[in-house]
Amino acid sequence: MTEFLRWPGIENADPAFLRALHREAVRRGWDPDGIAGVIAYESAFIPSAKNPLPKQTASGLIQFIDATARGLGTTAAKIRKMSSLEQLPYILKYYERGAHGRKLRGADFLRMGWGGKAAQWGLPASTVLAEPGSDEWGVNPALRDKEARRITVQTLLDRWGARYARATRAGKYRVPALRIDQRGRRADGGGSFFAVAALALGLGVGVWAWRKGRP
């Protein structure tokens, strides 16, 4: 049985994608809920999601910006047209590049998505990542500490902890089993079971970056 925490929007996600995400994360020693939590925050599991702010290209499940997407051999515009399963290899590749062999857990994925200093390992929690007037401050209203007037590594850790706690209180989400018809096709219209299986087996590694410095 494949389970995640009940992150916002997870009920609308493709079951085949969730199963592949869980399997590939576990295979790498990563926390599946760490990735799922970031996807919930960035796109609510909507693969065609795009940042509505002017001049922003961030697109897809983890909001790849065009510069990051191009570094992975694609574009933000192409990402928006991909299914969740098609985006998964890019998501995995992005995290693998920054992990350097580490077993990623919880807030690690959020920090890597922020990019820049936040993605560096071993930084003190007090490290300032953004202040009023900076681009990072402008595009991350949900992370602003209005009293401290800055965003630090600790801010990211605190926000992650709060979101994780809410998802934990919401309980577990059991990924529905895939329904296959007699022709070997998914009964929900999601395509051939064998094609999905082949894609899942071929998943290597994938991509993302978050906010202004995001993918």
Image (tube, helix red, strand yellow):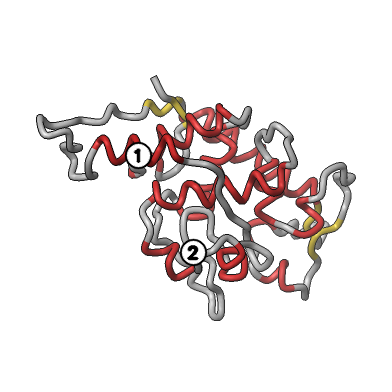
Residue located at (55% from left, 35% from top): 166
Residue located at (65% from left, 53% from top): 113
Q: Which residue is mark 2?
A: 59
Residue 188 coordinates in the image, percent (x, y): 18, 40
Residue located at (57% from left, 68% from top): 70
Looking at the picture, which amino acid does disc 1 mark?
A: Glu
Distance between the alpha carbons at the discs numbered 1 and 2: 20 Å
Residue at disc 1, secondary structure = helix
Looking at the picture, which amino acid does disc 2 mark?
A: Ser
From this view, report whether residue 146 is shown above or below residue 53: above
Within 10 Å of disc 2 (Cα), the crowding (few <14, some 14-19, many 20+) is many
From this view, report whether residue 133 is shown above or below residue 162: below
From this view, report whether residue 194 is shown above or below residue 45: above
Q: Which residue is mark 1?
A: 11
From this view, report whether residue 79 is shown above or below residue 55: above
Q: Earlier in the sequence, mark 1 or mark 2?
A: 1
The disc at residue 214 is: none
